[in-house]
Image (spheres, rainbow, N blue to C red):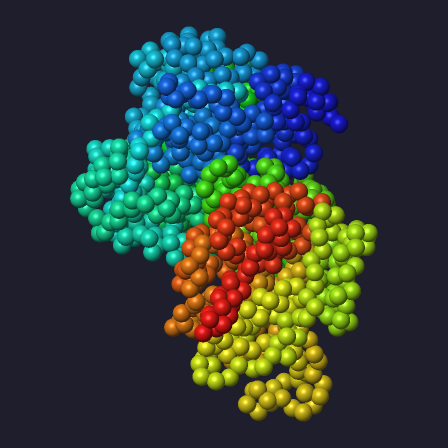
Amino acid sequence: MTDLEADLRKVVRGGVAFDVTSRALTTMDASNYRRVPLGVVAPRDADDVAAVLAVCRAHGVPVVARGGGTSIAGQATGTGVVLDFTRHMNRLTALDPGARTAVVQPGLVLDRLQEAAAPHGLRFGPDPSTHSRCTLGGMIGNNSCGSHSVAWGTTADGVRELEVVTARGARLRLGQGWAGAPDGLRALVDGELARLRTGFPELPRRISGYALDALLPENGADVARSFCGSEGTLGVLTEAVVRLVEAPRARVLAVLGYADEGAAAEAAAGLLPFGPLTVEGMAADLVPPGAAAGLPRGGAWLFVETGGGSEGEARARAEDIVRAADVLDARIVRDLAGQRALWRIREDASGTATRMPDGAEAWPGWEDCAVPPARLGAYLRDFRALLTDHGLRGTPYGHFGDGCIHVRIDFDLLTTAGIARFRRFSEELAELVVSHGGSLSGEHGDGQARAELLPRMYGQDMVALFERAKAVWDPDDLLNPGMLVRPAPLDAGLRFAVLPREPVDVAFGYPSDGGDFSAAVRRCVGVAKCRTTAVPGAAPGPGVMCPSFRATGREEHSTRGRARLLHEMLAGELVTDGWRSTEVRDALDLCLSCKGCRSDCPVEVDMATYKAEFLHHHYEGRRRPAAHYSMGRLPVWLRWASRLRAAAALNALASVGPAAAVAKRLGGIAAERDIPRLARRTFSGWWRRRKPVTGPGQGGDLVVLWPDTFTEHLSPSVGRAAVRVLEAAGLRVALPPTLRMRGRPVGDGRSRSAAALLTARRGRVCCGLTYVSTGQLDHARVVLRRTLDLMEPVLETAAPVVVLEPSCAAALRTDLPELLHDDPRAARLAARVLTFAQALERHAPDWTPPRLDRPVVGQTHCHQHAVLGDAAERRLREAAGLTGELSGGCCGLAGNFGFEKGHFEVSAACAREQLLPAVRDAPGEAVVLADGFSCRTQLDQLAGTRGRHLAEVLAERLEDDGRAR
């Protein structure tokens, strides 16, 4: 233990962590930069903060305050001690509806404040797109703004008083009239009044530099306002009194379509006299496939929100704006669900902008320059021309009404020549912004990305004044050095520099990242949507990511945290054991492989695949955990149980306490779990003995029904029900072949030689899911190649492959072609995979399902949500009269995860978030739907409730109707 760590542990009551994992998790924020800290402290209160500052001052170690870690300019990283306020100092201390104020701690997430204020008709004005995970302390440090700044201003406009601790331990309460000003600050300002009155550009989004003009007497000598945007360089915030604004009772969203972003930008300033709540802009490049259906015609759009005391009043204002705007098309959205869906497109732009339309990487650095709104159109034209001159691309979006543009640019930050171009472009863009009377930063702060260029905006004399102000507050340069004043070069310490230059040898193909695992890991840019937590009492959302973080609240259990550890593993500086790293293994251990990040993460990080890749290498040539053998090779054991007709005996043993306990201990299974019962007769066994359905109505399309391991051995009733429904819809059902031919086809390509038939081997198709999820990728390849051999005759037809188990369907859709990327049959099979509802919709479009006219409850399977989509399932439920929405989230069992020893508590916590409350609060006549075996098992074991596959529900109704006739 270092002397610094020991001294901190003596005086800090909160957490002190100098371990590899804690340090690795805070090497980066959402910027291009990386710094390795010495340690991380999670203070419990202001006393802890003061104690940390005293110890670090004595050791000469810098201190960096960190909130949600979503800063885009590098200001939430440091080489000394990082203060993490999200762990303990994250409370809403008081809320006074009468005074319209709230007292908050710096680690409080903005959405938690908004939820507390909403019942009183109040809200905090600023709302960055990261509102679900950004903290009030971070917002104050950056003077954040958000989409509603045209109505309610920046964070500085919402701050009344601040409590801070200075680097030398003074505790100050900052406010107007020089309240809390450190010694020397007033004298500094009084000596520079002329410079302060003339040296700052007038525009709504001037965030760059220190707001020293807030200290002018005509501005109320507001020390708290001046402190906002100082990026943790002047003092450490411990508490804030913030102003709340009255929230409109009703809101309406007008979406205005324009030919291009230039036309939208030109129109934005003209809408401000109508008093809108937002004037946000984005172009078609940032709209995900399928999302444009909700937008009016155009190549770019303005999102203009209006408010009022009633919906009619808000709508009337929106209609006035539409009439005044010169638009190609417009849409007025009144319902909240429709508004949320459209706003989600805009908010996710911070992630989707990190990829160009062709998949090339794009990076921040010049993310949020701002110009006077009336200059925005001209600025954008010049900006586009500058991009072209440098051979760069970027798609602007952002706060058009405030003249603030966000854009990520396809800089090459991996080569010397690319980094040199990054610097030249940055210097020229700074000159361009200044020529339009703008600010280098309009929202995210200067940090390291822009501080070096502040002299171009303010001149050397004003920057020297900034340095003098910093010295008044922090004479030892202890707080976040290298930011704002005396900055590090904008092209130093780039986070990509430590990654390997040659591709890493990996098992998966990573087709979206050019086969490069490093590029896959680079996908995580730190926007931290995975850190969104559940809200008690709030309506459930459709998202899944990231269930383990939502259960534990710990960064290492978030998608971002795991990506950071993989980044450090590839870097080899902090995490030095490579694929053998125990730190990475432990962080991935609680990843449920739910694939939620594949769809919910704006940059489509696929942590389930990364986990499988890591486990493959980590255990290569070594003994694996018992669960990898027991559950990872479940298809083998279940096939043997079937061949030996041992289901009854095994079920009997599993019901005997001591025998079950021994089996669970040997198999690495959680003691809290019951071992699922095996079916006495497999689905395939039932299929072989059934009488084929013939007669009228059976001349429809042929579909091949996939007998996945769970349907085959554990819930064959699902398979039987699916056959009943598919045949009722007029489809012809077949199962995959079980003979694997040796040799090539002959003649017409379908016939086989007699020798081939004689030497054929029996086998069963398998999606390889359990092998992939436990990282047994060599074994998975063998299983999948055998499956492709068996499926060759099917691939020679036009028949779709219907997969009832969502996790198996997702494995065939994604894992199969990515693992066997060298086998063209893999992509062909993946393209054939359909869910039960998709098969009915596409191949029996005229069939009408039986009516049930009952409410439904349950949960959309996480793999269905992330990979397969559930639109067809929704339409099938609606056609059958099954009303209501299924919840989001993850059931928490997730295949082998919830059965593994040590995972039960997290597994149960995931279920308690959305699934169990939804079932508990459902009306008695509700149908509990759960298409996944894991979901049904979790419901049975934690709630004593039987969930059913949609096929079972429909088949039961068909049987009832048949008996009634």
Q: Where in the figure is residue 480, as x and y percent of width and height?
A: 54, 25
* Left-right relation of 174 to 76: left
Q: Where in the figure is residue 668, as x and y percent of width and height?
A: 76, 51
Residue drawn at 56 percent across, 49 percent down: 890
Nearest to the observer: residue 961 or residue 774: 961
Q: Where in the figure is residue 78, as x and y percent of width and height?
A: 58, 30
* Left-right relation of 80 to 267: right
Nearest to the observer: residue 277 or residue 500: 277
Quadrant containing the N terminus is: top right
Nearest to the observer: residue 877 or residue 565: 877
Q: Where in the figure is residue 14, as x and y percent of width and height?
A: 64, 24
Quadrant containing the C terminus is: bottom left
Residue drawn at 63 percent across, 38 percent down: 24
Task: Return the residue found at the far front.
Answer: 964
Tally of numbered discs:
0
* Left-right relation of 794 to 181: right
* Residue 889 can be seen, yes or no: no
Looking at the image, residue 339 lies above or below residue 124: below
* Residue 658 can be seen, yes or no: yes
Residue drawn at 37 percent across, 18 percent down: 99
Nearest to the observer: residue 685 or residue 287: 685
Looking at the image, residue 147 lies above or below residue 779: above
Residue drawn at 32 percent across, 45 percent down: 335
Q: Which quadrant of the figure has residue 630?
A: bottom right
Looking at the image, residue 150 lies above or below residue 186: below
Q: Which quadrant of the figure has residue 806?
A: bottom right
